[in-house]
Amino acid sequence: MGFFKKQFLDVIQWLDDSSNTLVYMFPMEDQEIQNGAQLTVRQGQVAIFVDKGQIADVFGPGMYKLETENLPLLSNLESWSYGFKSPFKSDVYFLNMKEFLDNKWGTANPIWIPDSQFGQVQVRAHGNYAFKIENPVVFLNNIVGTKTKYRLEDITAQLRGFIVSEFSDIIGSLHLSVTQIASNYNEIGEALKETLAKPFGDLGLSITHFTIGNIGLPEEIEKNLKELTSMNILGSVQNDKLSKVQILKQLEVMSKSAENSGINSMMQSGMGMGMGMQMAGMFANGMQQMNQTAAESMSQGANQSITSGECVNCPTCHASIKKGSKFCSECGTKIEAIPTKNKFCPQCGMAAEPGMKFCAECGSKLDR
């Protein structure tokens, strides 16, 4: 009865209906593989025969008839005296060789990275990566062990540990400050991918894709960087001669001026900051013109004081007009020639100008 209870397997294959299984051990129990049985290995799979914990044969994609010539290593291990004509038992593992995409990684806690500006900075980072089994024999020996099924979640924690441990070292080796990190995600990702090749390779894996989604900085540092960015933006759109501090002061003044209904209505009419800048320019020009006008007035006053002796008074309106004018420029009265009545000094006989009270030659008092 025991003989008839045995089940001889004649077809060995793995129909993978999951998306997260890396290794599948074909269920054997008391079943035996019949000599001449068919092995089917599909695309993206590898089948490995293990006898008493020792790898015997590896099969890539294809269909195989399990006979002595197809299993030389297994035949030698079994040392069958009947030329491999009787049924045999062996562990058969199928490995999924496809690429496993969109695996998440991230720092569970903030990690310290060196920074040239802030010294040491705590950051958080996350992203995704892809990998595949590169060496199925190494992976089966080092990772799977005696498990009958090995899934994606069984290894991702270990792979995340590799990534996080290398992350801070890579940032330090690239000598990037926190202000440069955001613009160098690609460079950091490529450097990490290259560095992770060895720890992944030791497990029989290869990392095929690696990206950084975000590197989060402490709140106070992000605030300082945002303020610096705002200053740079303001500086780029204003006149190069204006300093950043002056720009901020102008914005503050204009904000307060909005409380004034007159200025506020002007800004609402579309004049805005441009009008404010024009008003400032007009004020400066007006001051310059006022200074220039004052200087000219002082000059003209000086000239008038020098040439005041060349003017006479109109006999009608008494306005001051230029000596020799025929009509008054103020009232139009015809100006008659005023006869000149000369005076002479009674002492020295020197001629004296009209209106002189003392002789310019000897100082004697002149008669009126």
Image (cartoon, helix red, strand yellow):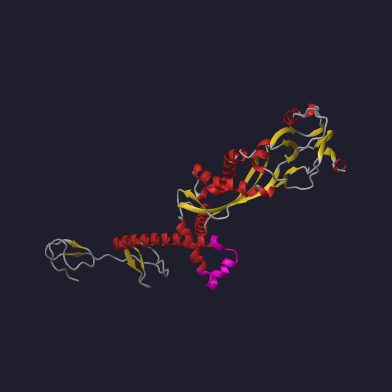
Rendered location of residue 143, percent (x, y): 65, 42
Quarter the C terminus occupies:
bottom left
User: Which residue range is magenta in the image?
Assistant: 256-274
Q: Quadrant of residue 315?
A: bottom left
Residue at image location 85% in from the left, 39% down from the top: 8
| Nearer-the-camera pick, 281 or 195 | 195
Horizontally, residue 199 falls left or right of residue 173, namely right
Majority secondary structure in the magenta region: helix
Q: Residue furthest front?
A: 1
Horizontally, residue 178 falls left or right of residue 103, namely left
Rendered location of residue 29, percent (x, y): 78, 44
Rendered location of residue 239, percent (x, y): 49, 53
Horizontally, residue 355 falls left or right of residue 114, namely left
Q: Quadrant of residue 40?
A: top right
Residue at image location 57% in from the left, 48% down from the top: 164
**Is residue 272 inside the magenta stretch?**
yes
Quarter the N terminus occupies:
top right
**Is residue 122 inside the magenta stretch?**
no
Residue at image location 53% in from the left, 43% down from the top: 170
Residue 205 in sight:
no
The correct choice, above or below, for 114 with respect to 87 in the image is below
The correct choice, above or below, for 206 with respect to 365 in the image is above
The correct choice, above or below, for 226 with respect to 174 in the image is below
Rendered location of residue 181, percent (x, y): 54, 48
